[in-house]
Image (tube, helix red, strand yellow):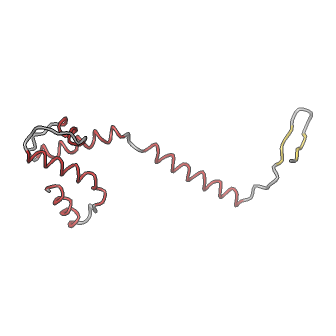
């Protein structure tokens, strides 16, 4: 290890390597990737928020179609609990939950994908 003494009270260490343009480029690339990872980590909604959003989305979508189940009943079904209600409504909610879980697998620009999702939704 090399030391360079500038005055009686200051010691500066000279590293045993040179900082080259390649090293600076690699450090910059690593820092950029760490920033992306941190941004993705911070951008993820909480599991509770995701669950509440799923419940509200399913409830409002099915209510338009005449489904009578409440948000509490949909929550119970999402948690694999039993609920009392019309069999048709329960089946609709279960189908909606299953469709919601795989919605990212569908291509929103293709009619065939939309029809496939709708078929799964209708059961």
Give percent across and percent down for residue 14.
83, 47
Give percent across and percent down for residue 53.
28, 41
Q: How many marks?
A: 0
Give percent across and percent down for residue 71.
19, 37
- On the rendered image, what quadrant is the C terminus found in? bottom left
> Residue placed at 19% from the left, 40% from the top?
74
Residue reaching furthest top? Answer: 9
Q: Is residue 113 above or below residue 60?
A: below
Q: Which quadrant of the view contains residue 12?
A: top right
> Residue placed at 57% from the left, 52% from the top?
32
> In this rendering, would 31 be left or right of 85?
right
Residue reaching furthest right? Answer: 8
Given residues 27 and 97, the one toward you in this image is 97
> In this rendering, would 45 be left or right of 30?
left
Q: Is residue 30 above or below residue 86?
A: below
> Residue placed at 90% from the left, 40% from the top?
5
Given residues 90 and 115, the one toward you in this image is 90
Q: Which quadrant of the view contains residue 80?
A: top left
> Residue placed at 88% from the left, 47% from the top?
2
Give percent across and percent down for residue 18.
79, 56
């Amino acid at each position: 290890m090399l030391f360079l003494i500038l005055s009686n009270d200051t010691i500066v260490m000279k590293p045993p390597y040179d900082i080259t343009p390649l090293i600076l480029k690699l450090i910059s690339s690593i820092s950029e990737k760490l920033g992306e990872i941190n941004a993705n980590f911070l951008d993820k909604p909480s599991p509770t928020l995701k669950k509440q959003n799923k419940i509200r989305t399913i409830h409002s979508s099915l209510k338009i179609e005449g489904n009578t189940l409440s948000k509490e009943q949909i929550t119970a079904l999402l948690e694999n609990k039993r609920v009392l209600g019309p069999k048709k409504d329960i089946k609709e909610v279960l189908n909606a939950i299953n469709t919601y879980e795989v919605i990212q697998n569908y291509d929103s620009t293709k009619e065939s994908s939309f029809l496939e999702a709708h078929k799964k939704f209708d059961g």
